[in-house]
Image (cartoon, coloured by chain):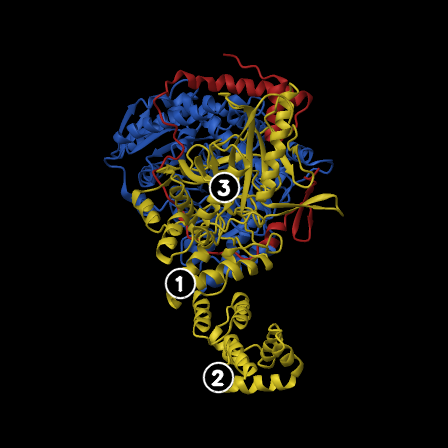
Amino acid sequence: MAHVIDDETIDYVGILAKLELDGEEKEKAKKDMAQMLDYVDMLNELDTDSVEPMTHVFPVNNVFREDVVTNGDGSEEALANAPERKENQYVVPKTFI
Amino acid sequence: MSLMNLTAVQLGQKIRAKEVSVQEAAQASLESIDAKEDRLHSFITRIDRKKVLARADEVQKKIDAGELTGPLAGVPVAVKDNMNTKGVLTTAASHILDNFVPRFSATAVERLEQAGAVIVGKTNMDEFAMGSTTETSYFGPTANPFDTTRVPGGSSGGSAAAVSGAEVPYALGSDTGGSIRQPCAYCGATGIKPTYGTVSRYGLIAYGSSLDQIGPIAKDVSDCAAILETIAAPDEKDSTSIRRDSYAFTKSLTEGVKGLKIGIPRDYFGEGLDPEVKKLVLAAADVLKSQGAIVEEFDLSLVQYAIPAYYLIACAEASSNLERFDGVKYGYRTKDYEELHQMYKKTRSEGFGPEVRRRIMLGSFVLSSGYYDAYYLKALRTKALIKAAFDKAFARYDVILGPVAPTTAPKMNSSLADPLKMYLSDVYTVSVNLCCLPGLSLPCGLASDGMPVGMQLIGDCFREDNLFRAAYAYEQARGPVVSPFAREEAAK
Amino acid sequence: MSGMKQYETVIGLEVHVELATKTKIFCGCSTAFGGAPNTHTCPVCTGMPGSLPVLNKQVVNYAIAVGLATNCQITRKCKFDRKNYFYPDNPQNYQISQLYYPICRDGHVDISVNGNRKSVGIHEIHMEEDAGKLIHDNWLDASLVDYNRSGVPLIEIVSEPDMRSSEEVIAYLEKLRTTIQYLGASDCKLQEGSMRADVNLSVREVGAKQFGTRTEMKNINSFKAIAHAIAGETARQIELLEDGKKVIQETRRWDDNKGASFPMRSKEDAKDYRYFPEPDLPPIVISQEWIDRIKSQEPEFKEARMARYQKEYGLTAYDADILTDSRKVAETFEKAAAICGNPKKVANWLMDDTMRLLKDHSMDPEDIRFSPEHLAALVKLTDDNTINSSVAAEVFEKIFTDDIDPEQYVKEHGLKQVNDAGALEETIRGIVAANPQSVADYKAGKKKAIGFLVGQTMKAMKGKANPGMVNQILTKILEE
């Protein structure tokens, strides 16, 4: 089955992924994605109805930490790389409208 | 002969024997890098000379005081730039992190430093480890030390080129779908992707969390075993790290291959594999057979399904792992924006390169409402089938032997135009990551174009010992594989 | 509300409860409330590249405990999933939560409204991490981000759409709050945000089989506001339907000041969370032994305690209800009553003075700091007439605020009641001599004049006189 990715779909994925595609790039993205989806359709040759999806390969369970405070004031480490900060906080475009 | 022509273990021995000082070793690495970087560009960040020498001095004192006795004490090393190094720029080869200075080091890096390693720089790579050529790096490509018009492979191309080009004795790489093994094959280096969970992922900038592993890239098999022994350990900061029964990798080296059962999957030698690569890999199998290994052909099955399953899982995880790069907490933020979502979109569109954007788009799509079952869950079910096929194989064989890549290193600027074709070249490496298996890549000769060819040894989970046995035995018979850059270094 | 049609409101709740762990769900940072911005952070809860989560075991313990107390099935193998959405309060731009295998499912709690009992179904309870805090900065006209709350453990309790009125909703929330507080799993303070409710609401004609289109109202932080929001949203939806319009399925923000709700999301929020299994965290396998251990640690809950208090201490249902509203009060009551042997008096101190002082200090019962031993000692001091009731009230305030030892306090401040008849008589004779007018009034039949003389006596005795004895002696002297 040949997939066709339309503008609406690519714009929607752009909203999800927070990526802005325009003009030529958008056309290329549509083509790339359609091509990849055509390719991965190969998996439909496999009957997997009775197969459990495998998330974790090893039977490792119950990895926990104890409820003990181990960290101190990490504010300077956290904020050292901030593109914009005001004192001890990150600055972002306003979220309250 | 230069110190940079020694293996890490050999150099470590000389340092402990006081034949060579840590400073001399570091100097040799820095000078080699100075002489070759114009042509190779293995590094994104070269650590300031004074800092390297001060660190060398500190390590020398600890060695002299008897505090450091391990095989890597005092030996210079390069670290792939997707591993955090405290106080040292860590970019993952991306514009979006091109000013990021982490405040903590990856556990694997910490373990190396505790063992007395002297880090000389951070190596080039495909952006966020997404690529097979190191050409997707924001900082420009790395050249192959066997032929600078060719790519070193990827994503750990900088680490492989630095080792093969004798800039450093060894380096750390990471492997999500072949990113250690394939550049090793292209550059004539030796590397291992250990069983998932063997080396802590803490501090490794995630690409595909269920697939990523850190591992050594070195000149020979003994180095790989010694380095892995140093960096492998359970880590309470990584919930997926595993407490193994044994971490003694070096002791398997000399056990020989007598009676070792090696399976050759016929489906790894079919269409698409370069005949010269095929010939050299099969010749290597013959060498092991002549040493007493039992070598048999068999059908692994499902090989062609590994790539689509891998790309669906890797891209889905990557789309989520890379959401944190948003211009809020660290890294690049677009200069010009009016509101929040525009800031996000512009920052990410300007900050990520085309290959990364492509994979994020695909990953976001396959996880989106209505497609999750058809793509993501389908891939996880396929993964279960592939794992079962390997389980069946390892019921009969100790080691699976095959090629690493279908061809030798391609020319620069010949791969990115057709991404799907580039993805297909990972056909022999990705299932190892899907199934959490260990895979070792080592050179098995040169093709007629003078480029190295790699073979891959795949073991069952936690059975690196079998890989080291086979690889070491083969390597003894093979002899060294030396790049022109290493010869140049030796001629100094 | 116009029209001939009769409507019914259908309500389901998503209740977020911050768990009372010392540390965050995936890192060793403190959960303490009110630190300076970003001081309780580390690479994990600020989403640094390369950081990885490690699960706090106590979160699982609390989640199991709440699940068992709300009659849920515990999922024997549960997993975390990633919920992906971009927002600056969420440092990774995904939240680690549970979608496919939540830790608890299929529970219910019983509520009672105006004497009618009803069961409210619990669809599931899942574990997740809280987000950071955003505040608006007027000077920059931008938002500031503080990640101190980022990664604080939450459970989200998702009810079935079983409620039909704000009374039922509040009864359900109160039931949850009491139960969770009894478990010690959270302090459940709505005003501090440690308990928050999202209200899913739809309306339909009475008798209709299908549910109407629902809206979700987010993070309403008081019972009063919840009642307002339910009334407001019900009216808005009915008006839409009456006008022949459709209710749009959307998330709305209730503004209690304006008394109205507003749509919250823009087109940039697709509400497509792309959930997938969290690869950084292995599954959690919960054994029967683990469940049994948590079950065995379960406290006696409010209903059982209420019944027992009526039987064991002879309290009225009303008093038992108040005393058992908070586990802290109930346990203080039981311990103090056992020490002093006077449950009625202990109950009175807790129901009257304690509740008044909590209100004065804007405190919750869980914030009570005084020990039952000191309350019991106070009761003893009044029972054996060592202090009188007005002194006792003064001493209790010191117990409430500073948990003082009442015996020592009474001794140090000389507050013992004077029960010495000789000493009292001497003082009273002096008062009588100094107030001839009052004595004359009394003798002239104005019996009320005795009140003034009692007051003067108490004043002279600095409040410590035994009031019964003062009355008795004064009457005797005046009748002489």
Relative to the observer, which residue lies in front, C204 or B397?
C204
Q: Taking C236 as reference, is C416 above or below it?
A: below
> Tag 3 or tag 2, which sits nearer the N-term?
3
Relative to the observer, which residue lies in front, A17 or B61?
A17
Query: In the image, what residue type sits under mark 2?
Result: Asp
Instruction: Give the color of chain B as drawn.
Output: blue
Rendered image quadrant of residue C202: top right
Q: CA distance from mark 2 to mark 3?
A: 54 Å
Q: Secondary structure under badge 3? A: helix
Q: Which residue is mark 2?
A: C420
What crowding class fits label 1: few (fewer than 14 Cα within 10 Å), some (14-19), or many (20 or more)? some
**Residue C171: which disc?**
3
Q: Residue furthest right?
A: C139
Rendered image quadrant of residue C441: bottom right
Q: Tell me if I can see residue B161 in this picture.
A: no
Query: In the image, what residue type sits under mark 1?
Result: Lys
**Residue C335: which disc?**
1
> Tag 2 or tag 1, which sits nearer the N-term?
1
- Marks 1/2 in contact by CB < 8 Å: the verdict is no
Quarter occupied by the N terminus of chain C: top right
Query: In the image, what residue type sits under mark 3?
Result: Ala
Spot occupied by residue B419 in the image (x, y as percentages of width and height): 54, 23
Spot occupied by residue C423 in the image (x, y as percentages of width and height): 52, 86
